[in-house]
Image: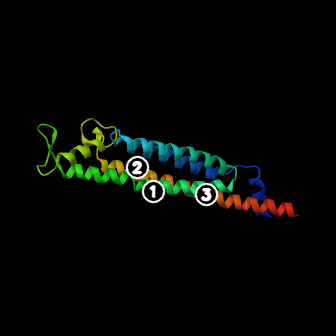
Amino acid sequence: MENNLKLEKMRYNNNSISYTLGLIAILFSIIATFVLLNSSAPRFSVFVKIILNILVLLFGFLATEKVKNYQLKYSYTLYGIGIICYARILWYPLQLIINYHLFLTNTTYDSVKKTRIYNEDVTDELVAKISKILAPVVKGESSPILPQSAYTRAGIAIACLLIAGSCFIAAAYIGQKKSIALSNYLNSIKKQ
């Protein structure tokens, strides 16, 4: 009887837990994107990252709105977006760590002149490649708002993407369970 009362209330109340988790996931995805974009120099792959994030935000918000109204198929969309958030960890934060490591191991810092000195065995090609990938803020050429270390920036982005992916998947799971329960309840009412 108590279970039926909860299911009856679900007919008139929104799935606020999934909705809130979806919005939290979107917020952390935005934070991760800003941290990563602030750490990279402008180039074509940055454009691709921006487009990918816009798609995650648009589809994430749409799916979150629909899961709020117990639409089951959008729970599966949220699962997919959560997996995309986890996969994003393997793309740019990992690249940022690798390139920053190359930058640090192939340069030394002259504290008197406050400039970086490149090791003699480093090719100009590698230096040019690293310079095109890392933002001036990360290379120490301008003052940062965030910590200068790309390791720290990548760690912040990874943590934000993990939270975003987990919140999307939790929202999807809760939405799926509630949608199925409500659907079964409504079907049982129709049969009576």
Dot 1 amino acid type: Ala
**Which x, y percent locates residue 93?**
37, 51
* Residue at figure coordinates x 82%, y 64% from the top left: 188
Q: Which residue is mark 3?
A: 76
Dot 2 amino acid type: Ala
Q: Nearer the viewer, residue 101 or 18?
A: 101
Q: Earlier in the sequence, mark 3 or mark 1?
A: 3
Query: In 3D space, how far apart are the residues under numbered discs 2 and 3 (Cα atoms)?
Result: 25 Å
Q: Which residue is mark 2?
A: 157
* Residue at figure coordinates x 23%, y 43% from the top left: 128
Q: Which residue is mark 1?
A: 87
Q: Earlier in the sequence, mark 2 or mark 1?
A: 1
SS type, badge 3: helix
Query: In 3D space, how far apart are the residues under numbered discs 3 and 1 (Cα atoms)?
Result: 17 Å
Q: Nearer the viewer, residue 57 or 11?
A: 57
SS type, badge 1: helix
**Which x, y percent locates residue 131?**
25, 42
Q: Earlier in the sequence, mark 2 or mark 3?
A: 3
Q: Is residue 82 above or below residue 114?
A: below
**Which x, y percent locates residue 150?**
31, 48
**Residue count near mark 1 (Cα–Cα under 10 Å), binned few <14, some 14–19, many ≥20:** some
**Residue count near mark 2 (Cα–Cα under 10 Å), binned few <14, some 14–19, many ≥20:** many
